Amino acid sequence: MSAHESWTQRVSDYVDDLVQITEAMDLILDETRVRTIALQPNQVDESTVKLAETISQLEAMVERRDVLLRDPEAPEAGLSLSEKLLASRRIEDARLARRCGEAAEQIKTTHQRANALFVCQYHLSQFQSEMLDRLAGVAAPPTYEKPNAKGGQKSNRGGGELFNEAA
């Protein structure tokens, strides 16, 4: 086995591990989303701990990629693993470069899903206190202002006022 082939195998192992970590993150996000919908906060916290662990694994993968990029057996041309692999002009390396790109896209999608989930959880965590404030008659400015037809101002009813008016 040549030096390039052993480096290529290490890159392949790296991509396999990266995909496995990303798939684990996706599974944790799925579990967290389901638990969020079911409003089971103790399980959401458990999923968050698991997600933090996989994020730590992903951070370790970044270090591992940097080692592969600086490896003396790596091709000189290129700044990324994909560029280095494509520089060899070998079909096997081009396939591996494509896998690197697919893994990168999977990571981007996972990142977007995680952001969306945690924004949702943030709003849900505020929901109960906002409802209690409204029921108690505490007037608070709404998150999203909508002007009404009268003078461009939205009337802001304190929680109790709405129920009194409705009764």
Image (spheres, rainbow, N blue to C red):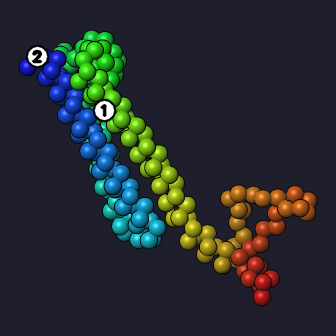
Label 1 residue SS: helix
> Disc 1, disc 2: CB below 8 Å?
no
Return the residue found at the far right: 151
Q: Is residue 74 left or right of residue 77?
A: left
Q: Tell me the quarter of the image containing the N terminus.
A: top left
Return the residue found at the far left: 1
Q: In the image, residue 47 lies at what x, y percent? A: 34, 60
- Looking at the picture, does residue 114 appear above or below residue 138? above
- Looking at the picture, does residue 25 appear above or below residue 67? below
Residue 2 is marked as 2
Q: Amino acid at mark 2?
A: Ser
Q: Is residue 37 left or right of residue 161?
A: left
Q: In the image, residue 161 lies at what x, y percent? A: 77, 79
Q: Identify the residue position indicated by label 1 in the image.
A: 99
Q: In the image, residue 156 lies at what x, y percent? A: 78, 68
Q: Tell me the quarter of the image containing the C terminus.
A: bottom right
Label 2 residue SS: loop
